[in-house]
Each structure stands twice: as structure tokens, then as C-alpha cells.
Image (cartoon, rainbow, N blue to C red):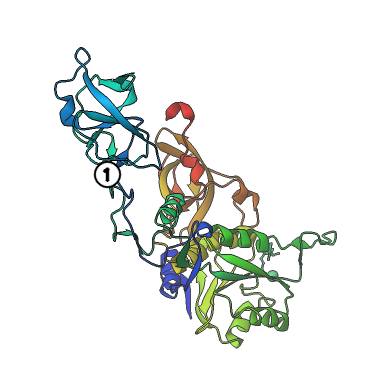
Amino acid sequence: MRESLSVAEAREAVLGETALIGAETLAAADALGRVLAEAVDSPRAIPPADNSAMDGYALRAADLSGASEGEPAALRVAYEVAAGGGAPRLLAAGEAARIFTGAPLPPGADTVVRQEDTDRDGDTVRVRLQPPVGEHVRRAGEDVQAGETVLEPGEVLGAAHLGMLASLGRSVVAARRRPRVAVLSGGDELVEPDGDVSDGRIVASNSYSLAAQCAEAGADSFYLGIARDDPADIERRLRSALGADVLVSSAGVSVGDRDHVRSVLEKLGCRLIFWGVLMKPGFPLVFGRFEEGPLVFGLPGNPVSAMVTFEQFVRPALLRMQGRRRIFRPTVRARSAERLTKRPGRLHFVRVSLERNGDAFVARPTGNQSSGVLRSMTLAEGLLLFPAAAEEIPEGADALVQILDPDVLAREASEI
Ligand code: AMP
Ligand code: MG
């Protein structure tokens, strides 16, 4: 087992063990946010036929040669074509067809003139301009050609993709399944949120923040409860979850006498890959995997450490499993609102709020940065990367910030 890795080394080790998860077939309407696991070809052209983009008149452009405001061209209105309807016959020279948006272009017609550019008088329509051939006509197949591959495996299904699948007549689709993550808390001091804390006990809040982080990363979690600081109890709970794709436990991975998670994992046959990452918060992190079984993340117990290590290692692994191409948070460069100092050696993830000023950002630490102070996370819009070797970030200096809340990029209505 490797020890005391840099964040980059640890991330590489995690992703090196992370394999693509299987696909499943599901209703396209339920597939929002899933990663497509098949190529989707179109069985037909979209739109299926040439049709009108406007309410107006379908006609032959050649009949309007020389037409202008002063000298409109007069055409006989032969018939009307409604959306969903069809033309009764070929449109002859000198004729126009009343047409509505989405209605098929009559045979013989090549152009549509907007209603606003015409005057109607009984069976006659006068057109006050000479349009280019094909104006306001949507061509058959201009969106999608028959037989064309429209969506590729690996695309994340967004709203437009679900609309496109519907257009292609697809109500069922193959997508990567949601990873199943088992979440375990551990510690004799822990109680559930409705438990009695009068004797100094602590609520196992990690179970809730980690489950929510799983959901945000497109995974389904199930809860293994609170294990006592007792190897047999930890073993029993972990054993029940070996069918999961990922096992996430928090606490009990340090070097204390009551930290049994590592030894239990080894006993269960988990191959431990590394322990300890040169970061703050979050040094005591263990990563391993079961052959033909789950990836295992033994996260530190402190609430901020658990969340930040999840962010850096578990989230990218869950996204990679699902075949997502972009697995890391977006980053911006921001000016530090304060002078920051630390000892060299570990990469610090400073919880910051982000204030946007035009295209520039100012990052401000969210108060007490202790790894037990969860408030620093509820206020955090980003994590400022204070590089391992650095000792100081002067006030006003630039730093890279991982964006946790993409709404920080939003602009006021007056700026758009
Ligand atoms: P440990 O790794 O067991 O030494 O735990 C480190 C710190 O995290 C201790 O103060 C624990 O009380 C706290 N802690 C451990 N597990 C949880 C949890 N599930 N939720 C909230 N705090 C926890
Ligand atoms: Mg403990």
C-alpha cells in the first residue's frame, strides 16, 4: 500500500481503478442526466417533408419577378394548406396557396411569402416583394437526415437530447446505470439526527451529506447505518454491502486505537491501494478495491474532510464510471480577498465564497476553516487551491478555485 500521496497521485490511482459501469435500458423520459450507451440513428428525415416556416402564401418565386411595394404581383389563391394537411394538387404557374406554419409545401411551389408582405382581395393575393427562391421553406431533413447518427455514446442526456429522442420516435434508450453506493458511518459517539445528544454525542451528519453528494453525482446510495467502534460490527455492515459498486465509509481510518476500518477491509479481502493524501482537510483517507467488487473509499470522519475528499476523489470516480467525459469541477482564477498562510507540504482546499466583478472573481474564506466546521461548507461556493508547496497567498493574488456552485457565474438581468 502506498502512503502519503499528493492529491494528483491519489486521483490518478483512483481513476486508474475506476471501470465503466454497465448499461441498462430505460424509458427515455427517465433518462435525464444519464450517459448514453448506444449510438442513436435516425429512422427518418426530420422534418419529413419541405414545409412552411411562416403563415403566408406558398408560390413559385419566378411568378414574382419584379414585384415591389409600388408594383405588387397578383396571384390567384388556388387552395389552402393547413398544418397537418396536404395540398390537393400541383400548384400551377400564377397560383398561390394559402399556407400555415408547419404545413407541407405544395408540389410546384418553391417559396413562401409572409402574410405581412401581401394584401388579400377575394381569390387574389398581391405580393409586394420579390423573395429569393426557397425563402421561409424548411427543407426535408434539414435537422436530421434519414440514417444519420444523431447521438453518440458518451453524450450526457439533457433536455434537448430527450426532445430529439422523442422526435426520432424513441421512447426507450440504453444508458449507463446509476452507480450504487453504500454509505457507512462509524464511531461510538455517533447518533442519528433524532438521537439524544445531551451526553455530548455527535450526530452522524456525514451519512446525510455524503448521500446527497452521491445523488448530485448521479449515483444511488443506501445507508449502512452507524457502526460501533468494534471490528465485528464494522465487518458485519461492510460485508452486507459487497454487492455495491462503491463503498464509502467515514471515520475510523486514522491511527487511533479505535480506528478499525482499514484492518476490517483487509480482513474482508479488500486490496488497499493507498492511505494518506497530502491535503487539508482530509489527510487520513484510505482507498482500495475488492476484486470483482466495489471500490472502497474510507474517508476521514470530520464533516468537512469527508465532504472535501468526496469532492476530490469519489465524485470524479462516480462520473468516470458513468462514462462522463468531464469529471472535474469547473475552475476559475480568482483574487484572494485575504492574505492566506500555511506550512508547506499539503494542498489546502480553502472554502471560499465567490464574488463576481465583471469577468473577475474575488474569493473570500468562509470563516473558521477547521475540518469540523461544517458551516464553512454550507457557505462555500468554491474551494480555493492553496498549492502544497506554497506558504503564502498575498491579499489580491490570483489562485485557482474549483466552483462548487455554478450559479456564481450568473449575471444580473441588467448585465445580459
Ligand atoms: P475519527 O476519524 O473517528 O477520529 O473521527 C473524526 C471526527 O469526525 C470526530 O470528531 C468524529 O466525531 C467526527 N465524525 C465521525 N463520523 C462522523 C459522522 N458520520 N458525522 C459527523 N461527524 C463524524
Ligand atoms: Mg471515530
Tell me if I can see residue 399 in this picture.
Answer: no
Say which quarter of the image contains residue 169: bottom left
Residue placed most toward the observer, 87 or 207: 87
Label 1 beta carbon less than 8 Å to ligand 1: no
User: Which residue position is annotated with label 1?
Assistant: 139
Q: Position of residue 415 (x, y in %)?
A: 43, 28
- 71 left or right of 88 in image: left
SS under mark 1: loop
- Please give the count of numbered marks on the rendered protein: 1
Residue placed most toward the observer, 63 or 145: 63
Residue placed most toward the observer, 195 or 4: 195
Q: Position of residue 400 (x, y in %)?
A: 42, 49
Say which quarter of the image contains residue 397: top left
**Which residue sits at x=48%, y=60%?**
171
Q: Position of residue 82 (x, y in %)?
A: 39, 37
* Ligand 2, image quadrant it occupies: bottom right
Amino acid found under the numbered disc labelled 1: Arg
Q: Position of residue 177 (x, y in %)?
A: 50, 68
